[in-house]
Amino acid sequence: MWQSCAPENEVEFQLPHIRLSGRLWGASDKPLLLALHGWLDNANSFAPLAEQLSEFQVLAIDWPGHGGSDHRPGLYPLHWIDYLYDLELLMQHLSIKQQPVAIIGHSLGGIVASAYVAAFPERVDKLVLIEAIGPLYESASKNNQRLRNSFKDHALYLKKQNTAPAVYESIDIAVKARMRLTGLGEQWCRLLVERNMQCQDTATCRGFSWRSDPRLKLDSPLRLTFEQVDALMTNHGGNALLITGTEGFKQLKESLPKAQAWFDQLICAELDGDHHLHMENAHEVASQIKQFLA
C-alpha cells in the first residue's frame, strides 16, 4: 500500500502524476484514518492528534508543494481543485489494500475532503472537519479583480525564478516568524516549520531554506460563487463531524447556518482553541473524534 522511506514512520506514495510524502502512525491491523492538512502546514500538524488516537492507524500526507512532497510540475498558478485529483488518485492507491474508515481534514484539507465526499459519498463513510465546512466562495463581481491579481502575482513569481532562496542560519528565525504571524505556540510552530524547511548543506546541516512551493502564496485565479458551492454541497451524503475552535475563524461561524443545511448528518462541536486546535487541544479533539467514530 505504501513504501516506508525513512525512520520515524515516514512514508511515500508514487501516484501517476506526482510523488506524495507523509507520516503513518499505528499498527496496520487498526482502522485507517486519512488526515489532510491545511494550507502551508504539513503532515506534522497531525502528530499531536495521532498520539491521542492510538486505537487507529493515522496516515497524514503532505499535499503537493508542502513538506516532503513533490512540487507540481511547470510554473502555472495553483488552484485548490487540483487537490481533489490528488485525493482521488491517493484513494485509488489505498484501495489496493485498505480504505480509510474516515477522512480528517483541517482547514484547506477539510475544504478538499468536504467537496470530495459531496461528489463521491460512496468513497468514505465518515468525515471529520476541523475549522472547515466547504469550499470558499465569493460574489461573481469579484472575478475580474481576482484574475488580475493572480496575473500580477504570477508575473512577479516568474521574475524571481532565478533568485536564490533565502537562507537562515537557524530554524528558530522561521519558527518565531510563524509565531508572530499565526499566534500558534512555539512547539507547534517548530513542528510545522521543521518539515517545511530543508538544510542547504546536508553534510553539516548548516543553513536552512524553505522547501514549500512559493506558488502556494500566490492569489488564486478564481473562486467559486455561493450558488456553485451550494449546488455542490446540498444533500451532502457524508456523515460528518464539524469541530471548531472558540478562537477559530469567525467567517466559518458566520457561514455555518447556511452550511448546516447542506448535510444530511452533521454533528457540531466547539472546543477551546484557535484555528489549529487539533494541535493545541489534541486531547479534546481526539475525544470528539473517537465518540463520533464509535
Image: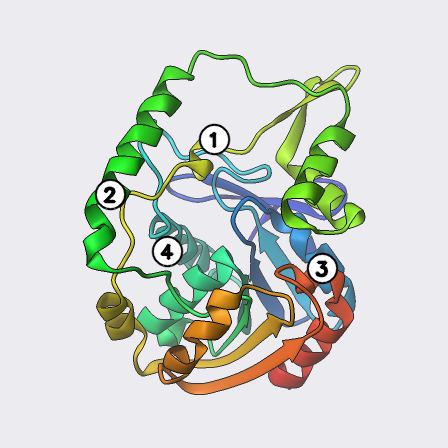
Q: Identify the residue shown where x is 71% and y is 51%.
A: 184
Q: Secondary structure at mark 3?
A: helix
Query: Alpha carbon of mark 2 to alpha carbon of mark 3: how far?
Result: 36 Å
Locate residue 106 relative to residue 182 in the image: left or right. Answer: left
Looking at the rendered image, the disc whose residue lies closer to the viewer, 2 or 3, is 2
Looking at the rendered image, the disc whose residue lies closer to the viewer, 2 or 4, is 2
Is residue 81 shown above or below 195?
Answer: below
Crowding around mark 1 (Cα neighbors within 10 Å: few <14, some 14 to 19, many 20+) is: few
Query: Alpha carbon of mark 1 to alpha carbon of mark 2: how far?
Result: 21 Å
Amino acid type at image mark 4: Leu
Which of the marked residues, 2 or 4, is nearer the chain's N terminus? 4
Q: How is the image coloured?
A: rainbow
Q: Quadrant of residue 104?
A: bottom right
Q: Which quadrant does the C terminus fall into? A: bottom right
Amino acid type at image mark 1: Pro
Q: Identify the residue shown where x is 30% and y is 29%.
A: 152
Residue beneath label 1, please? 214
Q: Identify the residue shown where x is 72% and y is 45%.
A: 189
Crowding around mark 2 (Cα neighbors within 10 Å: few <14, some 14 to 19, many 20+) is: few
Residue beneath label 3, please? 279
Q: Any mark on residue 84, and which?
A: 4
